[in-house]
Amino acid sequence: MTLMSHTKPYIRKKAVLIMYKVFLKYPESLRPAFPRLKEKLEDPDPGVQSAAVNVICELARRNPKNYLSLAPLFFKLMTSSTNNWVLIKIIKLFGALTPLEPRLGKKLIEPLTNLIHSTSAMSLLYECVNTVIAVLISLSSGMPNHSASIQLCVQKLRILIEDSDQNLKYLGLLAMSKILRTHPKSVQAHKDLVLQCLDDKDESIRLRALDLLYGMVSKKNLMEIVKKLMTHVDKAEGTTYRDELLTKIIDICSQSNYQHITNFEWYISILVELTRLEGTRHGHLIAAQMLDVAIRVKAIRRFAVSQMSALLDSAHLVASSTQRSGICEVLYAAAWICGEFSEHLQEPQQTLEAMLRPKVTTLPGHIQAVYVQNVVKLYAAILQQKERAADTQAAQEVTQLLVEQLPQFVQSADLEAQERASCILQLVKHVQKLQARDVPVAEEVSALFAGELNPVAPKAQKKVPVPEGLDLDAWINEPLSDSESEDEKPKAIFHDEEPRHAKQRPPEADEQELARRREARKQEQANNPFYIKSSPSPQKRYQDAPGVDHIPVVQIDLSVPLKVPGMPMSDQYVKLEEERRHRQRLEKDKRKRKKRERERRGARRHSSLHTESDEDITPAQRVDIVTEEMPENALPSDEDDKDPNDPYRALDIDLDKPLADSEKLPVQKHRDAETSKSPERQDIAVVEKKSKKPKRKEKKHKEKEREKKKKEAEKGVDLDFWLSTTPPAATPAPEEPGVNAAVASPKEEQEEPRGEEQDAAEDGEQDLEKKPSKHKKKKHKKDKEERSKDQKKSKKRAPPREGEAEPVENGALDEEPLPPMSSYSLLAENSYIKMTYDVQGSLQKDSQVTVSVVLENQSSSFLKNMELNVLDSLNARLARPEGSSVHDGVPVPFQLPPGISNEAQFVFTIQSIVTAQKLKGTLSFIAKNDEGSTHEKLDFKLHFTCTSYLVTTPCYSDAFAKLLESGDLSMSSVKVDGISMSFQNLLAKICFHHHFSVVERVDSCASMYSRSIQGHHVCLLVKKGEKSVSVDGKCSDSTLLSNVLEEMKETLAKC
Amino acid sequence: MIKAILIFNNHGKPRFSKFYQPYSEDTQWQIIRETFHLVSKRDENVCNFLEGGLLIGESDNKLIYRHYATLYFVFCVDSSESELGILDLIQVFVKTLDKCFENICELDLIFHVDKVPNILAEMVMGGMVLETNMNEIVTQIDAQNKLEKSEAGLVGAPARAVSAVKNMNLPEIPRNINIGDISIKVPNLPSFK
């Protein structure tokens, strides 16, 4: 609290922000602290001010009404402040406040519009527009001048959307959709713009535009928009987006009861077109739409049936190509429509055959079941047709066909299909018998499926007022039992009734109709894949309840004929223009009729009221679905209020879908990348593992190395890089020639003899250094095993890690092969002998380094009895054979014929490794030639650099990060200018000469790791700039680090 | 309010993450993974906003991200933040990092794991934006670094003295006494600070 009034603004600022957390934790502190906080709003320092605004905004967002009192203060801030960040916050806050206080909104509009006009910052502009929209929404209507500000907003948004910046575009569309909710008209003017956005590359922008379109369609532009969408569907490459488009098309078309559709034939053909899409997941959606339209739009049935039968004919196309994708759901609808409205079929026989094709049995079970059921419906229709034509022969043929084909369904794996099929097979067999006796059966068979389906609003049942004395349970149960018992009865009454309904349309619907509708609703639900709640027995599903009359239903006054079926048959023109003209012609009389109707309908048509008011174009077909059948005198209930929400609910789903889908895709991608990488990675691990082997110990090792080399050669360049990062031990021969040609050439040739020599030496004399080396070998082996286990483990544990290494590998892959390098440097030279040496630390023995000295005989004499002695320092001592004193030398275990070189190793024990040091030493030998032998001496200075204490240790980036996180490393850095070497080579150099390994590499930046023989961690970050390289290092010992960096600087300076 | 700040590379490896709301470690991982999957499949030239109730349980969260070379900077914010404002903030953040580390690279985030949170803390505190002016931030960071160095000088001095003596190659002086002497002094020194 006191800090809040600290003299330093920096501290005040932080204190203010912290208060928010305090408030969250101790809400009771808010009241006492609030005045202080308020003061800070007027702090002279803008930083403090913005912090205070921040805090209050956060607080106010949770419960805005408590902060209404601050509004004037904020208002003042808003008009005076120039800090955009603060302004945005305030404006956002106002956006939250205005819904609570409309008067505030009125006051705000003016300064906001001023800001909109004046500001150049897009972010501020956007927030202003957003808040203005919020204000306008909260004001609802009633403000005379707000259309001007709406216009302004829309204009500005247009600028945003037209901007090339995708972000602005997106935000513009987002804000646009907010306006759309309240002022659809003003947005519709920008339809062109939105349609343009559909072509955008960005999927989220397209989705936003789609959302906007949803609100923008009208009767006039629906076809145009959908046509555009259809072309997009064709173009869309990603299935996700295509599915999204598909659902959007359907959503747009079907919104508020198909209010915008003027031509259902067009819609059906659109749906059929959609079925041709490959791999959509929304087959069931299309199917539901087809069913819905076919059931609810009577006039369209003929057309629908013809389309559907065509679809059934080409079922193999749909089903075979996309069996799993769900588009075959469409066949479900097609089969059902064809069966149910079989009277409209042109060639029922053909359709029947199509439905009985053996291929059908490959369809999913529930579709087969529908097929079976509808085959019988078709059959009934055909029978009737044939009998009417007195063509008994044909009728019997059809029966025969059925008897032959149905058994394939009886064998269906799906229970329901099987059950239905066997039932119907028996029925058909029975019919066959009757037919054989020349009994007319058509009437009775078709009676099975008599009756008409009517759409019923999903809420219809709830809206029916409960009549007095009606037991709801009985009311629901009775029809069920009825329908079960009366399967066999002929129901001719119903069939007769149907045409009568169509013709005369009694002004009052009777109970039957109502009950039937109810039944129909149940069926619809059953058919609707979204609505499967109860599963009525398959038998009764498609049979109309015959005994509906008995159902005790209240006498309800159905004041209007719900539909005028058949009348506008002539309007069925696919061509838009003709249709329009026709529509206009019709419009007049319809309007008249409508008026009449409306008078009579009264309150009943509440759901369609807005429909009529919004536009005057009358649909070509009289659509009885305009009101989904609501039971008359239905009570307008709260649930209706949800209706307008529906689109938003739909929106929610839409947004979710791509997300859900997206989760899958990238996962796969990721996996792929990983798996493809991992074998390589494993190889590398192998190499790494091998590289840890002590070298030059024995022939076997060499052989292995050679094998390894072969492998490496096969693996190509990328491994070269890896090789070079491993200790030089792993790559002895091939790298030496470049630098030390003199040594190498003989040496290479000599590898074999040398091995023999070593063998001999081993056999012959007790070699000092052989002992430790054997030891080491064993240890190495164990180590190797452990390590490889570790590596395996870590691989299993964290697969992403393998991915991590990718940057490094990738980096290695594409770059040029490395120049040969050698870590051997000249130790001393005279006319007899040349000494080169290399110092290697070993992790196995603490504080020990192995000095490998290559001795090359440069004379024509035979060199023997070589002995190396070093003047020990306190810090470094030569390991001598047991029993020998500090001043004794260590014999070199071989002799050198002229021109031959060989390598001897000496072990030193080091106390402190943080600094470099030099040891003086002497090599004494006897040179023997034809003239005799001489005793010779060669002095040298052994230089132990700090890097020589480092041991290349591979490190995973996770471990690396952990190490750095631990924080107990000291840091220092060097920078070297004027480096022209490629980063790749640079890294290799560091790896090679300084015994580091690359942890990760990204472009021209790499993190590296090494460990000293005493366990110090050394981490490096190497960055390459234009001409310079900077090396940041962290190490558990600062002296070691600075020494290593100094040495590194020298190396780099040579580059 | 800013809910979380995530930085990961093109391969989805998290380089830095800061959550301003308590989540379990598992959830944090999950969030990072999920976010990566969402963000990584987006093209370069699409907008930088993503919607979705990604952080468990909240739906008005938005992901605002920027992609720099190999790194994705993702800010997860709720509806009280301005989208474009946050985009600017990311820009400022990256510029500041670049200024502090010269030629910023993703490995800097790992290497300077101690400093990055400090820099961020100068900009965002407890999920709220503290400072958006880059110069201001850099000044504060520099001041901090200076302070740190002067402290390191004090603390590091005795250690350096010890190691210097240790490394002296003076066989005549008995080592143990020498070191013992100084190591006694070591604990005393920091108290002078």
Image: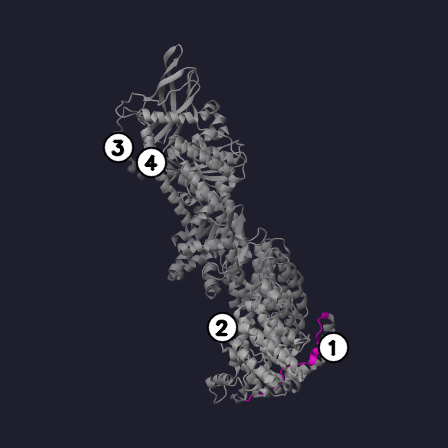
Question: Is B41 placed left or right of A1008 in the picture?
Answer: right
Find residue A1030 and name its label. none
Q: Which chain does the numbered disc 2 sit on?
A: A
In terms of secondary structure, where does tag 4 sit?
A: helix
Find out whether the residues at labels 3 and 2 contact each other: C-beta distance under 8 Å.
no
In the picture, residue A527 is in which quadrant? Answer: bottom right
Where does label 2 land, which residue?
Answer: A415
- Residue that numbered label 1 is attached to: A585
Instruction: Please give the range of residues in magenta.
Output: A555-576
Near mark 2 (Cα within 10 A), the count class, few <14, some 14-19 or many ≥20, is some
SS majority, magenta: loop
Q: Indicate which disc residue B180 carries.
A: 3
Q: Residues within 10 Å of mark 3 (few under 14, many from 20)?
A: few
Horizontal and vertical percent position of residue A815: 54, 37
- The answer to which of A800 and A875 lies nearer the viewer is A800
Q: CA distance from mark 3 to mark 2?
A: 90 Å
Which element carries disc 2, helix, strand or loop? helix
